Image (tube, rainbow, N blue to C red):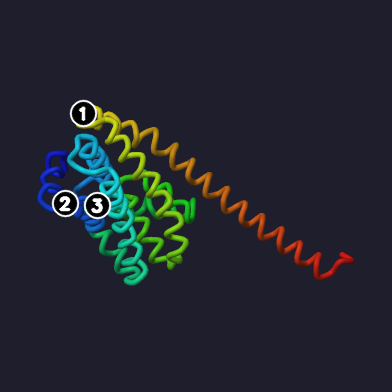
Amino acid sequence: MSIEMLSESVGQFGYPALFFTLWLGIVGMPIPDEVIVLSAGVLTSIGVLSIIPAFIATYLGVVSGLSLGYVLGRTLGAPALNWISKKKGMNRHVERAQSLLERYGSYALCISYFLPVVRHVVPYLVGIGKMTFRRYALFSYTTGLVWTLILFLVGYVIGDQASSIDAFLNTFTRGIAPAIAVLIVAVIGCVFGYKKYKEKKLRVQARVDQDPDC
């Protein structure tokens, strides 16, 4: 979807157009999420959209689309995986998503945001695996906020320079995105590690309080 097409859709349907073009990505719409989010930033920079409602609509479109995959995976189970595997060229993305989950566990949700198509497959798989929604939301919504904010702001700064957008997407996919994914995983890992440390410290303190002679 080009900036012009998105601009026409927004002009006709308003901010919901941003939401639904991203939300429909989960059912296989051939619209790269990165392009839509960047385009939303561009349309904001040239005055077609207001920055706050545009960002909110964009972010909600991103996370709700992926959340739908989680819900389908959790409620339908294996048939959901069979459904997406039947789509042309999807097998390799499913295999890559499975490999990420086997290697990184819940952190695969963070990493997958920076991998086109795979980001839509991982929520199905964690849903099938019965991951709790609380845990899914923690990893997915946090990373989604960072991912959306970066692309939206870049689109806002670049403006309507299409050649600059193409160059950024190429650089983002190959270099910047993996670095950001690693950083997010590291931050979440530190938070979880600190939480476990505090819990362990509290348990030790509780045992000491119960038996002062220890």
Is 126 on the left-hand or right-hand side of 47?
right
Q: Nearer the viewer, mark 1 or mark 2?
A: 2
The mark found on residue 22 in the picture is 3
Of the residues shown, which amino acid type is indicated by label 2? Gly
Label 3 Cα neighbours within 10 Å, binned few <14 / some 14-19 / many ≥20: many
Residue at 42%, 59% in the rendered image: 137
**Secondary element at tag 1:** loop
Label 2 Cα neighbours within 10 Å, binned few <14 / some 14-19 / many ≥20: some
* 181 w.r.t. 200: above or below: above
Where residue 41 sits in the image (x, y, percent)?
Answer: 26, 39
Q: Which residue is mark 2?
A: 14
Separation (CA) of disc 2 from disc 3? 14 Å
Among numbered discs 1 and 2, the one appearing first in the sequence: 2
Is 98 on the left-hand or right-hand side of 17?
right
Q: Nearer the viewer, mark 2 or mark 3?
A: 2
Q: How many marks?
A: 3
| Contact between labelled residues 3 and 2, with CB atoms less than 8 Å apart | no
Picture quarter with the C terminus:
bottom right
Among numbered discs 3 and 1, the one appearing first in the sequence: 3
Where residue 1 sits in the image (x, y, percent)?
Answer: 16, 43
Of the residues shown, which amino acid type is indicated by label 3? Leu
Q: Which residue is mark 1?
A: 161
Separation (CA) of disc 1 from disc 2? 23 Å
